[in-house]
Each structure stands twice: as C-alpha cells, then as structure tokens.
Image (cartoon, rainbow, N blue to C red):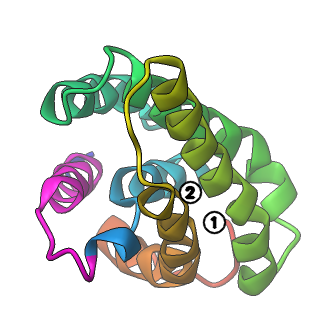
Amino acid sequence: MLGFVLSLLLALVLQVVQMPDVVAPFWPLWLPLALAYWALYAPGMPVLLAGWLLGLCSDVLYDAPLGQYALGFVTVSYVAQRLRNTLAVFPLWQSTLIMVPVWALFAFLMFWIDGLTHHSADPLRRWLPVVTTSVLWPFTGAALGGLRGRPRRGVLP
C-alpha cells in the first residue's frame, strides 16, 4: 500500500512539473500511467477512488472544469481493470500496443471537454503525450514492479 501511495504522489508531482516549451508537448501522462499500472497489476488497490481524488486535485491545479481530470483518470483506471484478463495472454510489447487506445481515450476526453467548455488546448500538448506514455509503459511497469516488491516475469502476476 505504501508503494501505491508513494508512486501516485510521485506521478502527481511529475505531472505538474513545469517543463520548457521544447519538452512540454512530449511530457508523458504520468498519473494515467501509474493508475493503469496499479489497476492491472494490483487489483486489490483502490485505483478508482485514487483516480477520482487525484483527478479532482488535478482539476484544481490545472484550473480545469471540476471533474475533467477525475473523469479521465477514472476512465483509464476502469478500462485498465477491464483489460486485465485480456492482457494476461499477451507479451509485453503487445500489451503496450493494446494500451495505446487507453492513452488515446484519455487524450480524447481531455480534448473533448476542453472543446465543450471553450478552453483553448494545443492539439500537440494533448496528443504527443500519448506517444511518449506508450513508449514509457514497459519501463514504468518494470520500475513499479520493483517498487511493489515482485519481479515481473510475464505481463500479469
């Protein structure tokens, strides 16, 4: 449980770090990445509740409409939980490809809600993180697997 909380707090800090304009469009979706990991590999953790609470925190931090990030984080967590059994039969590289639509769904929700609320959003800052998050998925899984205390042999424990 301590690893769960610490990893989500670290992801929150990484998510809100201000990056230079050159790097900012490529900055990964750290919170959805961490939430998806815990939803897949530790089904006993309260990932949906954590996603909702961290989403509300992100809504306040980013001055977004209340519930925008909460909806996105809960959606990522829920879809990852539903994909848990499906990903059990695939090797890591294929599970990475399967997770790409999950990150794209998050980006779409954020972009769509920004459009509904007439907030201007740079399309590059919404869609490029999907690529970097997908690239970081295997590395994050290895790092959080070590934090969890179990070596990863396959896709699921």
Q: What span is colored magenta in the figure?
A: 3-23
Relative to 89, residue 154 above or below: below
Question: Which amino acid type corresponds to the residue marked 2 in the rendered image?
Answer: Tyr
Compared across the picture, whether 110 is left or right of 148 comes to right
Compared across the picture, whether 97 is left or right of 149 comes to right
> If the image is split into quadrants, where does the N terminus sit?
top left
Relative to 32, residue 10 above or below: below
Q: Residue 133 carries which label?
A: none
* Residue underneath mark 2: 41
The answer to whether residue 96 is magenta is: no
Please report whichever mark, 2 or 1, sits nearer to the chain's N-terminal start: 2
**Does the magenta stretch mainly form a helix, a strand or a loop?**
helix
Residue 119 x/y as whole percent:
37, 29
Tag 2–tag 1 contact (CB < 8 Å): yes
Q: How crowded is mark 1: few (under 14 residues within 10 Å), some or many (20 or more)?
A: few
Question: Which amino acid type corresponds to the residue marked 1 in the rendered image?
Answer: Pro
**Regarding mark 2 in the picture, which secondary structure is present there?**
helix
**What residue is drawn where x is 63% and y is 66%?**
157
In front here: 82 or 127? 127
**What residue is drawn where x is 15% and y is 71%?**
19
Between the C-alphas of marks 2 and 1, the distance is 7 Å
* Residue underneath mark 1: 157
Could you tell me how many numbered marks the image carries? 2
Q: Residues within 10 Å of mark 2 (few under 14, many from 20)?
A: many
The answer to whether residue 21 is magenta is: yes
